[in-house]
């Protein structure tokens, strides 16, 4: 591809007289997907490797939680900022910067010799992902047109949905065969190859603005406020709700998130335009997205520790034990895509939440002598069947009534809800479960965590019934479930 500009592909006239977009090679899509797949994998891959990492680095319960939370908090907290960066400046430069940071941070994670170094390098990986993802998406959108663009977006969504299954299995294989360091080191050669090929095949884009148009204080206060909130939730386990540390952390979170709201109201180009908050369908479904993601990612986090510590499975066995969950999520999504045109999104969301609650309630009944086939698998099956429809229906309900030119911001807001929900879910379930470092702590904590999920899902179903506007999906809408599970 030439290095001039990446304009929309010109139309080509066929002998039949029809006008059809000129086909572009799929190289650009392949490169962007390789980078995005690393980003998606990096949550679930690490979940399965966590017990091995924890043994090597002597993790506390909080260290386990922060290894997941640091990544998803910074990738989610900075996602809208990364999107603005890609819009204002050169898309390719933003993508390569994010990819470079992600790759270097992956190497640092593999070499981590202490819990603090692991958490900091995971945070840096998340920051890289926040630049890489929106830039990759906009490169795909500008590289292809017409039918090719539709195909590219469908493949992008499918890759997202495959992330959980591939991640847990891949993480298990790498950890068992080569040690936990391999789950991070594998990103390095992929990152280098993608960076070199991207420099050669993706053209620079025109700058549409300057760094003055970036809301840096808004992004900084949002991330700092979210970090303080997760820290506060985590401290409730060790220090209690009324301790000075916990109270100070909650107060700091309130001040910082309040400052974010004030800054956003006063700047010329806020990360989220104020009118966005008036889009009831988007705001309500982004809330549902955050809570359901928190529940599922939190469930996978606690289950990964449980399957290895309590049931004694190796990392690769645990990866295989998660595959039925991924299968049932995929099956649930496929069924929902067929039902969506007839039922609309809202009934599918409410029904899905009750099914997730039933699956969590099943897992909450596990006793002190559990078995995978008799106790865990039935719960996973029900949990997955309820989760699949949620992501199909949420995507459709959120985008209902969103003008085309706002679709990028809307999907960015949903992805932000997805990541921040994951961080808050893991932090909250760690606080509920208590000690995750010992077998006895996990035997006691596992049912508590799933009881909390079951209750949260029932409450969320009530919220969904009241707050989410009713929309009728058009036939064919269900395919674009681009918000893959971690």
Image: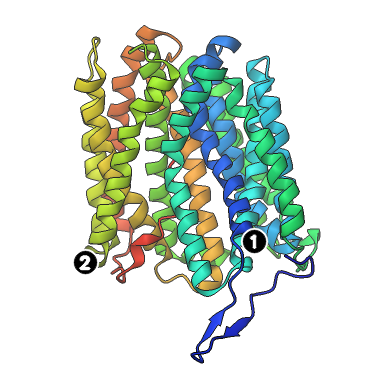
Q: Is residue 477 above or below residue 252?
A: below
> Is residue 216 rendered to the left or right of residue 382?
right
- Which image quarter is the N terminus in? bottom right
Q: Residue at x 55, y 38 (%)?
A: 72
The reply, left or right, for residue 466 in relation to residue 159 is left
Q: Earlier in the sequence, mark 1 or mark 2?
A: 1
Left or right: residue 325 compared with residue 70: left
**What's the CA distance linking mark 1 and mark 2?**
35 Å
Instruction: Residue at the far bottom: name it.
Output: 17
- Position of residue 233 relative to residue 330, above or below, is above
Q: Nearer the viewer, mark 1 or mark 2?
A: 1
Tell me: residue 227, above or below residue 275. Answer: above
Q: Residue at x 76, y 61 (%)?
A: 89
| Residue drawn at 43 percent across, 27 percent down | 301
Q: How far across and down, in percent of the image, does residue 116 sit?
A: 66, 20
Q: Position of residue 339 (x, y in %)?
A: 23, 60
Residue 342: assigned label: 2
| Whether label 1 touches label 2, CB < 8 Å | no
Q: Which mark is residue 139?
A: 1
Nearest to the observer: residue 329 or residue 175: 175
Q: Is residue 293 left or right of residue 270?
A: left
Question: Looking at the image, which residue is at 22% across and 14% down?
Answer: 367
Please tell me whether mark 1 sits on a helix, a strand or a loop. helix
The image shows residue 455 at horizontal and vertical percentages of 27, 35
Task: State whether residue 332 appears in this view.
Answer: yes
Give the structural element (helix, strand or loop) at label 2.
helix
Closer-to-camera residue (289/325):
325
- Above or below, comparing residue 288 to residue 64 in the picture: below
Residue 178 location (% of width, % of height): 57, 19
Instruction: Specify how the rendered protein is coloured.
Output: rainbow
């Amino acid at each position: 591809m030439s290095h001039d500009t990446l304009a929309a592909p010109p139309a080509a006239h066929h002998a039949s007289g029809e006008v059809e977009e000129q086909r572009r090679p799929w190289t650009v899509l392949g490169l962007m997907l390789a980078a995005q797949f690393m980003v998606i994998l990096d949550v679930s891959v690490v979940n399965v490797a966590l017990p091995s990492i924890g043994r090597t680095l002597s993790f506390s319960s909080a260290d386990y939680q922060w290894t997941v939370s640091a990544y998803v908090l910074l990738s989610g907290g900075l996602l809208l900022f990364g999107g603005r960066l890609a819009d204002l400046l050169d898309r390719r430069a933003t993508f390569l910067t994010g990819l470079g940071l992600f790759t270097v941070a992956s190497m640092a994670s593999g070499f981590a010799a202490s819990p603090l170094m692991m958490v900091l390098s995971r945070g840096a990986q998340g920051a890289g992902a926040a630049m890489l993802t929106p830039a990759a998406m906009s490169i795909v959108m500008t590289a292809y047109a017409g039918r090719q663009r539709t195909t590219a977006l469908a493949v992008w969504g499918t890759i997202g949905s495959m992330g959980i299954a591939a991640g847990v299995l891949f993480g298990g294989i790498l950890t068992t065969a080569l040690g936990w360091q391999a789950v991070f080191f594998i990103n390095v050669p992929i990152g280098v190859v993608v960076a070199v090929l991207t420099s050669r095949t993706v053209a620079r884009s025109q700058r549409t603005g300057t760094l003055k148009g970036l809301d840096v204080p808004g992004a900084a206060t949002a991330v700092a406020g979210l970090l303080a909130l997760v820290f506060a939730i985590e401290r409730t386990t060790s220090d209690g709700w009324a301790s000075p540390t916990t109270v100070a952390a909650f107060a700091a979170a309130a001040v910082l998130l309040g400052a974010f709201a004030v800054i956003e109201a006063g700047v010329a180009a806020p990360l989220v335009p104020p009118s966005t908050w008036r889009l009831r369908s988007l705001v309500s479904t982004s809330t549902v997205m955050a809570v359901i993601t928190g529940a599922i990612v939190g469930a996978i986090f606690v289950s990964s520790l449980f399957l290895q510590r309590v049931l004694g499975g190796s990392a690769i066995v645990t990866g295989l034990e998660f595959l039925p969950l991924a299968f049932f999520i995929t099956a649930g999504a496929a069924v929902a895509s067929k039902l969506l045109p007839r039922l609309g999104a809202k009934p599918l969301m409410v029904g899905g939440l009750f099914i997730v609650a039933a699956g969590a309630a099943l897992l909450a009944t596990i006793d002190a002598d559990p078995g995978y086939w008799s106790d865990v698998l039935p719960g996973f099956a029900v949990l997955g069947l309820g989760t699949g429809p949620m992501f199909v229906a949420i995507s459709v309900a959120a985008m209902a009534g969103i003008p085309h030119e706002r679709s990028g911001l809307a999907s960015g807001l949903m992805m932000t809800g997805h990541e921040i929900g994951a961080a808050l879910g893991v932090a909250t379930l760690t606080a509920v479960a208590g000690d995750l470092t010992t077998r006895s702590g996990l035997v006691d904590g596992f049912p508590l965590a799933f009881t909390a999920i079951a209750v949260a899902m029932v409450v969320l179903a009530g919220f969904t019934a009241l707050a989410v506007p009713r929309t009728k999906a058009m036939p064919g809408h269900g395919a674009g479930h681009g918000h893959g599970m971690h």
